[in-house]
Image: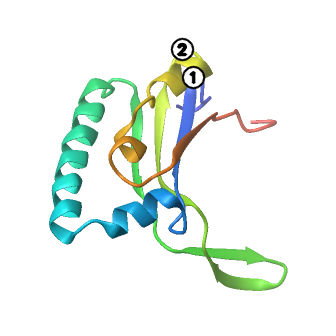
Amino acid sequence: MSDNSNAYLAVFLGSKTGSAWQAWEALSEAERNARGQQGMAAWHAWVDKYKDAIVSMGGPLGKTKRVDKGGVNDIANEMGAFTVVLAASHEDAAKMFVNHPHFAIFPGERVEIMPVLPVPGG
């Protein structure tokens, strides 16, 4: 993947203040556990379906620290996980995530897919 040809970064997003998260939190612990098991089974099925296209499984993301001219600060954002896939086109990469368990079962809200571009001058 040195030239990043046909590589796409998928970022899984969702807000803990959004309606999907609030509905998830309103479920009983047993219901959340059952949906979690269903979601993980669906996630594994998605991975199996696209295993030849997955460059990096990525993974869940933890708490965020922002570094800027003002120093280091703890912040919140909507990023929950990431994956890198290969596809013939941006559209094809996006189609891989239609009805993804991130938002079809889990309380995630969306997946944003963008091309990984070559490093300028690289």
Residue placed most toward the observer, 87 or 80? 80
Give the quarter of the image for residue 42.
Answer: top left
Q: Which mark is residue 67?
A: none
Note whether residue 11 is visible.
no
Q: Quadrant of residue 2?
A: top right
The spot of residue 72 in percent (x, y) is: 70, 84
x%, y% of residue 24?
35, 62
* Horizontal relation, residue 104 to residue 66: left or right: left
Answer whether labels 1 and 2 touch (C-beta < 8 Å).
yes
Q: Earlier in the sequence, mark 1 or mark 2?
A: 1
Please name the amino acid that badge 2 sits on.
Ala
Return the residue at label 1: 6
Q: Which residue is mark 2?
A: 88
- Give the CA separation, mark 1 to mark 2: 6 Å
Q: Give the amino acid at mark 1.
A: Asn
Tell me how the rendering is colored. Answer: rainbow
For disc 2, the neighbor class at 10 Å (few under 14, some 14 to 19, many from 20) is few
User: Is 84 placed left or right of 122 in the picture?
Assistant: left
| Relative to 105, residue 29 above or below | below
